[in-house]
Amino acid sequence: MTRIRCFVTIAAAALLAAPASHAMINPGFTPVHLVKQASVILWVDIKAGEAKDTYTARIRETLKGKAEEKTFRLDYFQGGRG
């Protein structure tokens, strides 16, 4: 019982001593602002690939900007290289 009480006391002290983090959220920032700031917006179809943790992505449509319509492979372990 003493070990549990000691652990709880240390955990409570650590949580109380941690500084609070504050985020500044702009309530006036909307998806319209995101579209204005973006240089390229793509509509992409993603499907499961042949192997586990691989996917095939195809650019379906370019909504804003310029991009060639192509298909590419995404590999979870390779970080999209390939």
Image (tube, rainbow, N blue to C red):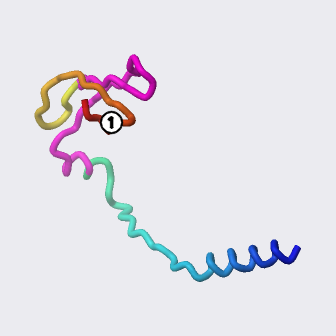
Relative depth, front residue between 39 and 81: 81
Q: How many marks?
A: 1
- The quadrant holding residue 24 is bottom left
Q: Residue visible at 39% across and 65% down?
A: 25
Q: Is residue 50 left or right of residue 8?
A: left
Name the amino acid, label 1. Gln
Q: Is residue 69 left or right of residue 80?
A: left
- The quadrant holding residue 73 is top left
Relative depth, front residue between 13 and 1: 1
Q: Residue visible at 45% across and 24% down?
A: 52
Residue density around tag 1, few if under 14, some if 14–19, many if 20 or more, within 10 Å: few
Q: Residue visible at 32% across and 23% down?
A: 56
Relative depth, front residue between 39 and 78: 78
Which residue is denoted by mark 1 in the rendering? 78
Instruction: Reply above or below: 19 against 46.
Output: below
Q: Is residue 62 left or right of residue 7?
A: left
> Where residue 26 sits: x, y (%)?
36, 64
> Where residue 69 sits: x, y (%)?
17, 23
Instruction: Reply above or below: 53 against 32.
Output: above
**Does the magenta portion include 42?**
yes
Q: Which residues are magenta?
A: 34-60
The residue tagged with tag 1: helix, strand or loop? Answer: loop
> Where residue 61 sits: x, y (%)?
22, 25
**Does the magenta portion include 11?**
no
> Where residue 77 sits: x, y (%)?
38, 36
Q: Residue visible at 29% across and 35% down?
A: 80
**Farthest right residue?**
1
